[in-house]
Image: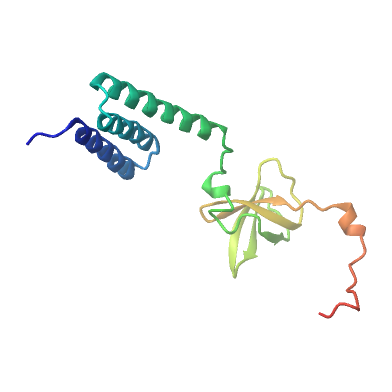
Amino acid sequence: MDWSTSTLWWLAAGVLVAAELATGTFYLLMLAVGTAAGALAAHAGLSGTAQVVLAAVLGIGATLAWHLLRARSPKTAPAEANPDVNIDIGQTVHVPGWQPDSTARVAYRGAQWQVRLAPGATAGSGAHTIVAVRGTELLLSPVATSTAAATAPAAQPDPAVPL
């Protein structure tokens, strides 16, 4: 069986795409873009050297571009402190008081939870925000209260607007 050069390039691209699907890295997909460019160069009748150079330039260029794009993008929080992963992050709980070791027990979502004060936070009773979940322990930070919100009068409903 005699395979054309473009067929070999397409097979290499397919192998790279399959490897990317198996490993989950996006970089192999960028290299597959380069091999697809090599296949298109073979279809266009370019020489073997031109095919390899085009595939290498596009594959390496796409990989470097993807790497630079990822380096510029903002880093996501770790799963234990990411509200996109854990719905408890950002919720408020009431802490009646803290133990000397900066832990307490609070009622949250129908159960008793062990909580710990976040590093750098000061202990005090009252409302606290969940900043991370580590196993079965909630990491808390005090809720920042603004003096403007505390002294502002409550908004009165407009009698002209029906509820």
What kind of colouring is applied to the model shown? rainbow
> What percent of the width, then of the height, locates residue 75?
56, 39
Q: Nearer the viewer, residue 121 or 75?
A: 75
Occupied quadrant, residue 43: top left
> What percent of the width, then of the height, locates residue 59?
37, 29
Q: Going by the picture, which residue comes out furthest to the top?
A: 49
Q: Residue at x 20, y 33 (%)?
A: 8
125 relative position to 6: left or right? right
Above or below: residue 10 compared with residue 93: above
Above or below: residue 55 compared with residue 135: above
Occupied quadrant, residue 9: top left
> What percent of the width, then of the height, locates residue 31?
35, 32
In the rendered image, which quarter contains the C terminus? bottom right
141 relative position to 156: left or right? left
Number of numbered discs on residues: 0
Q: Going by the picture, which residue comes out furthest to the bottom?
A: 162
> What percent of the width, then of the height, locates residue 151?
92, 58
Q: Residue at x 90, y 78 (%)?
A: 160
Q: Going by the picture, which residue comes out furthest to the left?
A: 1
Q: Residue at x 59, y 57 (%)?
A: 114
Q: Nearer the viewer, residue 54 or 71?
A: 54
64 relative position to 108: left or right? left
Q: Nearer the viewer, residue 104 or 30?
A: 30
Q: Nearer the viewer, residue 104 or 81?
A: 81
In the rendered image, which quarter contains the N terminus? top left
